[in-house]
Image (spheres, grey):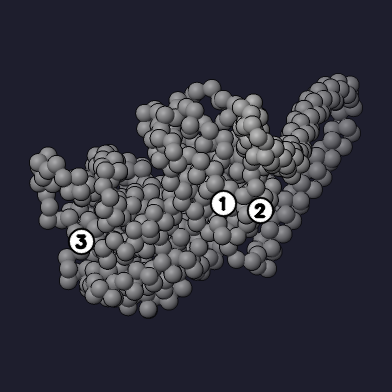
Amino acid sequence: MTGHIINLNTYTISKIYRRTFFTFAGVIWNPHSFFRMHRFFSLVLLLTLVFPLASNAYESDPIDSLRNSLARTTDVNERILLHLSLFKRLQRKAPDSSQIHLRQAILFSKETAEDSILGKVHVAQIEDHLTNDRYDSVFQYVAKALDKFESLSARDQVDMYTMQGVAYYYRSEYAKAITSHLQAEKISTLHKMEHGKAQVLNNIGITYIKLEDWTNAEKYMVQSLDICKKFDLKRGISYTLGNLGIIYKHLGRFHDAIDAYLESNKVFVDLGDERGIARNYDNLGALYEELKNYPKALEFYQKSLKKSRTVQDQSAMASALHNLGNLYAKHNDYNKAIKNYSESLEIAQTQDYKDAIRNNYLGLSEAYESNGNLIKALSSRKLYEQWKDSVTSKEHLESISELEIKYQSEKKEKSILQLSEEKLKAEVAMAKQGMKIRRLSVGLVGAIIVFGLVFVIFRQRSKNQKQKELIHAIADTQHAERQRISQDLHDSVGGDLALTKSKLLHVFENSEENSEELQDAISSLTKTADDIRQISHNLMPAELVKFGLLPAIEATLDQLQNTELNVQLYAHEMDSRIDSTKEIYLYRIFQEVVQNVLKHAKASQLNIYLNRHKNYVNLMVEDNGVGMKSDSKKGMGLANITSRVEHLKGTLNIDSVMGRGTTMNIQIPL
């Protein structure tokens, strides 16, 4: 079997993973001895403290009172703050209404010039994208909030760094996550924010959980819980109790862990937090499984799955499905185990939960092996090894080798058995030889047909591949030719035109009569030189060749300053240059996207985000235009974008709603 996924109630993160998953919001894996594979993986699902603190900050303002205030006021800034308050208050009770208030706040923010208000809107956008697992967007809005950093309140600064740390954590960029949380701690200490200390202590506790130092983990979680109780931070109380449940479980104090989760669930029920309840159910199932109370474990896993599906909590769904797979595998119901592991894996792949992908492959490998499907067992085990974070150990290599030996032995045994049966039949029933020959003939004809089909398919694929290679070669040649023509136009034709213009100006200035025809000729020559310069720039911008992608994009956007389109560019980690071919393709993609917006979107606002990550570059362009239908025919511009992205082996995602604009998200591997 695989292990338990532990869902932690913490204020830091939110995801899933493996063995008896204890769920709560975030992801931390801890290997331990357990079950037949002698490993135990615990998933720590963490929720950022910024959420509970923000929620409690509005606890005293009834929703009706906020709505009444909103109806009475005409002040733009006050309306923005009231919309943000309702966004936070309604996040869990009425998420659709919450989103409406956030959109209204964003809309009104375009009418204010106060950086403190704009900063609060950006922090709310960070929270919204983090809640919905859109981590690239989190970093982009953090960049926006940092532009207004001096105007942010200390609370907003802490929240921003905490949520940034959460996003980095989910991306497995732990060093950056720690840096962000330390920034939050520094601000909390500077401003004597006891509430913020609860968050910091909680995050430190989570770090010790990651390190499997359960004694120190308990120490810091208890300190965090004391502060939460002192200030009646209900959501913080419920989360920290959940984390203590995980710690108690690992210390072997199972009944203390159950008590902690039951107490946590009471608070969640009062808060109406369905997500928290779902994750607690999952953790309770894991604890009852530890105590070998399997009916109770099955009951809580199923309750967790049902409730998490109701609220569309992807991480809790994946966790509950994985734990159900473990439970079914433990009771030798391998078909159900495989079904649940597969569903969990599908969610994990959609949400890019790397650890969950890895460990679901391990569960599938064990289930397939026990079910006698050694081919799929071997395939799943190899995929598990590929996803492992650590270097492949001797134990894992031996495990794969064992599977391969078993598979090859089984094939040989079947082959020997088949040969023996055929020999026996030949000796006992020679009269049936003719029938065997006819059957063999039919089989041979079938094999020939299958071979022919395979050959045709292979040939077609090979032809398609060659066509793709030809298209890419043509594209590369076009880029090289563009660069050559651009250089020739600039250096040769442009130089000749400049020299000719200089001579004409000399003649004009020294002529006794200022010929109008000569003046017209000089004007025409000047316009021609300008046109040549623009054509040269369009073919291959000098900024792109000399300085790189970001300066080239900035130069292009400068040309849009006098238009009705308000353009904002946000760049992150783009100081150093990338591969020149990728720069050219990305620049052409950028040009196509901007041209599409100018021609078709009828937008007044265009936001461009260019971010460099460890293994890829992300280009996201969003506008507030008319949007486009999902089934609309792909035009030439979009076809060019798709072709270039495919050439770079990247991904393209388009999110568009009629009347609400379009977001185009492009990722290109480095």
Looking at the picture, how far across and down is residue 568, in whole percent?
Answer: 43, 46
> What residue is disc 2 on?
546
338 relative position to 603: left or right:
right
Residue at left offset 44%, top offset 38%: 562
> What residue is disc 1 on?
551
Relative to 137, is 256 above or below? Answer: below
Lower sequence index among marks 1 and 3: 3
Look at the image and tell me whether residue 325 can be seen: no
Look at the image and tell me whether residue 557 can be seen: yes
**Discs 1, 2 touching: Cβ within 8 Å:** yes
Q: Which mark is residue 88?
A: none
Relative to 39, is 458 above or below? Answer: above
Lower sequence index among marks 3 and 2: 3
Q: Which mark is residue 234?
A: 3
Label 2 is placed on what type of residue? Lys
Label 1 is placed on what type of residue? Pro
Looking at the picture, how far across and down is residue 476, in whole percent?
Answer: 74, 40
Spatial separation of the CA atoms under disc 1 and disc 2: 9 Å
**Discs 3, 2 touching: Cβ within 8 Å:** no
Looking at the picture, how far across and down is residue 102, in whole percent?
Answer: 28, 44
Mark 2 closeness class: few <14, some 14–19, many ≥20 residues within 10 Å: few
In the image, which is nearer the foreground, mark 1 or mark 3? Answer: 1
Judged from the image, the secondary structure of the residue bearing numbered disc 3 is helix
Q: Nearer the viewer, residue 252 or 270?
A: 270
Lower sequence index among marks 1 and 2: 2
